Image (spheres, rainbow, N blue to C red):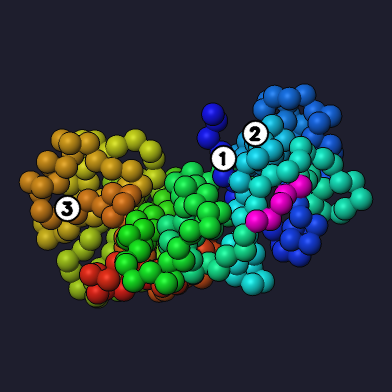
């Protein structure tokens, strides 16, 4: 017997889903999904034709959502819908095949649902809540599907009444932090390629309390930024690499060759260093190497002091996240 799948869905119209006993996704201009050839490639091609201004990288996800809604969802599957107006988790069973509701303006791609349970969010583990907090409007619930299925049982225990610790809290907190770090690195790679990364590193150094100046391209023997802690030496020579490849030992040696006596060196890359380059950095303590992961840590630490220009490029909001009780430090972004 095929295992029952669990789907998650979001909407801006809680009342529509609950009063009409449906789930739905938008894209009315896309038209009736049953009229399109039943392949993912056909859906992507139709999406590009319908929405030609859509960014190329967004097409597979957007078209794939509609494809899954038509072909992957089966009658009898479970659906989880977190309603924002009352902070409830609504769980139901898919009762119909796909149909196109042309009379509506927004949520035209629909399936009928029998809502079985409306349960407070506090009844679920932090991990389960985090998984359905996806920014996608329609998605498959994988990691915590069993928890939502068990909520349909009469013996489901509300975690708010349970004195035991939520074991998913630590995992959830780590997932949030890692997702944030991934987002920062992706935005840097996407929006600040090549020379554009240099003024950002200058801005970060200034947020850290340094005086920094970007060098003219092609000058200063390959040095991208010159920084001082105050008005006096030592001078810090900075090279910045935004490429995906790992930095070689010879590249760091070129930085060393540009340094005068008393200088310090700083090498910043969005990627990482080869094993030989790491050994070289260990043997030359006057040069500090920062890889992509370490750069993200610095950005998080000094984010509030970055210029507004770069806060718009890497938009973050400071929030508190739950951590295991034994960890007394508060994690925040």
Residue beneath disc 1: 5
Residue sitting at x 68%, y 55%: 115
Judged left or right of residue 89, residue 272 is left
* CA–CA distance in space, label 2 to label 1: 10 Å
Nearest the viewer among 20 and 305 is 20
Residue beneath disc 3: 287
Q: Residue 279 location in percent, x, y?
A: 12, 41
Q: Is residue 88 above or below residue 132?
A: below
Nearest the viewer among 326 and 236 is 326
Q: Residue 64 location in percent, x, y?
A: 65, 36
Q: Are marks 2 and 1 in contact (CB under 8 Å)?
A: yes
Q: Residue 198 location in percent, x, y?
A: 40, 54
In the image, which residues are magenta? 112-116
The residue furthest right is 103
Tag nearer the camera, 1 or 3? 1
Judged left or right of residue 241, residue 14 is right
């Amino acid at each position: 017997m095929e295992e029952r799948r669990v789907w998650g869905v979001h909407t801006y119209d809680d009342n529509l889903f609950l009063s009409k006993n449906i789930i739905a996704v938008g894209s009315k201009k896309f038209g009736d999904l049953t009229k399109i050839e039943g392949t993912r490639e056909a859906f992507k091609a139709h999406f590009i034709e319908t929405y030609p201004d859509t960014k190329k990288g967004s097409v597979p996800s957007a078209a794939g959502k509609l494809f899954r809604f038509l072909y992957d969802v089966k009658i009898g599957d479970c659906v989880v819908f977190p309603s924002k107006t009352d902070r409830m988790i609504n769980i139901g069973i898919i009762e119909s095949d796909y149909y196109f509701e042309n009379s509506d303006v927004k949520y035209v791609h629909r399936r009928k649902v029998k809502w079985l349970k409306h349960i407070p969010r506090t009844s679920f583990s932090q991990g389960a809540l985090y998984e359905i907090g996806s920014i996608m409007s329609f998605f498959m619930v994988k990691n915590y599907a069993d928890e939502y299925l068990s909520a349909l049982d009469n013996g489901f225990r509300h975690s708010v009444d349970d004195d035991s610790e939520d074991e998913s809290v630590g995992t959830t907190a780590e997932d949030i932090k890692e997702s944030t770090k991934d987002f920062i690195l992706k935005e840097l790679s996407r929006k600040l390629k090549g020379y554009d990364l240099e003024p950002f590193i200058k801005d970060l150094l200034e947020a850290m309390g340094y005086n920094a100046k970007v060098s003219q391209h092609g000058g200063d023997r390959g040095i991208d930024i010159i920084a001082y802690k105050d008005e006096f030496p030592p001078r810090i020579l900075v090279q910045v690499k935004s490429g995906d490849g790992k930095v070689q030992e010879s590249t760091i040696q070129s930085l060393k060759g540009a340094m005068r006596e008393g200088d310090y060196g700083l090498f910043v890359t969005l990627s990482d260093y080869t094993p030989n380059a790491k050994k070289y950095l260990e043997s030359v303590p006057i040069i500090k190497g920062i890889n992509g992961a370490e750069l993200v840590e610095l950005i998080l630490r000094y984010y509030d002091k970055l210029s507004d220009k770069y806060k718009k490029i890497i938009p973050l909001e400071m929030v508190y996240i739950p951590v295991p009780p034994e960890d007394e430090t508060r994690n925040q972004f």
